[in-house]
Amino acid sequence: MNAVPQYDSLKFNEIAVKLRTFRQEILSNNLANSDTPGFKARDIRFADVLKAQMEGTLPSMEVSMATTHSGHIAGKITKDDPRLLYRVPNQPAKDGNTVDSDVELSEFTKNSVMTEAALGFLSGTLRGRMSAITGQAS
């Protein structure tokens, strides 16, 4: 029995690139708000979210609203993104801001390198499939 789940490499790499880009947006938002009083730094657990995305077990972000009268309009509201977590600060600021610029910059840089790697893997997967389709070496 194989303990490592087998995923389609194209789907895996596509989701990885999308999540890396999503995380880059979160980290850049944290950095941009490093001086905003009361701002709470956010992040995701990349491996957990990637696994949930691949398995399709990520909870829905929509909540249905019940209607109590035939004249009511049925609707849905969007709740907070379940992937986003709050970062626990090493030393909280007096103004309530939890952004540590050094930590955020470090994570931003690491994520940038990982995004480049994910793009490289996706490119390699696409090149390999095109080579298989055309019958020519890439």
Image (tube, grey):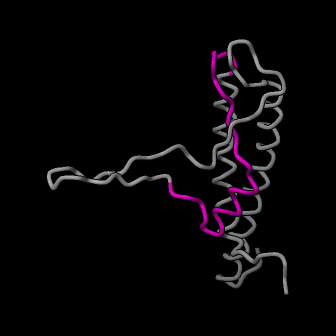
**Looking at the image, which residue sits at the far top?**
94
Residue, x 53% and y 43% (percent of image)?
A: 80
Check residue 115 for magenta coloring. Answer: no
Quarter location, residue 41: top right
Which region of the structure is painted magenta? 34-60
Rendering coords of residue 52 (x, y %): 66, 62
Give the vertical position of 30 relative to 137 (above or below). above
Give the vertical position of 57 relative to 63 (above or below). below
Check residue 54 for magenta coloring. Answer: yes
Q: Nearer the viewer, residue 132 or 89?
A: 89
Rendering coords of residue 46 (x, y %): 73, 52
Q: Nearer the viewer, residue 120 or 95?
A: 95
Give the vertical position of 3 relative to 59 (above or below). below
Rendering coords of residue 71 (x, y %): 14, 51
Classify residue 47 as left or right of residue 61: right
Residue, x 79% and y 54% (percent of image)?
A: 117
Q: Nearer the viewer, residue 74 or 117?
A: 74
Quarter the C terminus occupies: bottom right
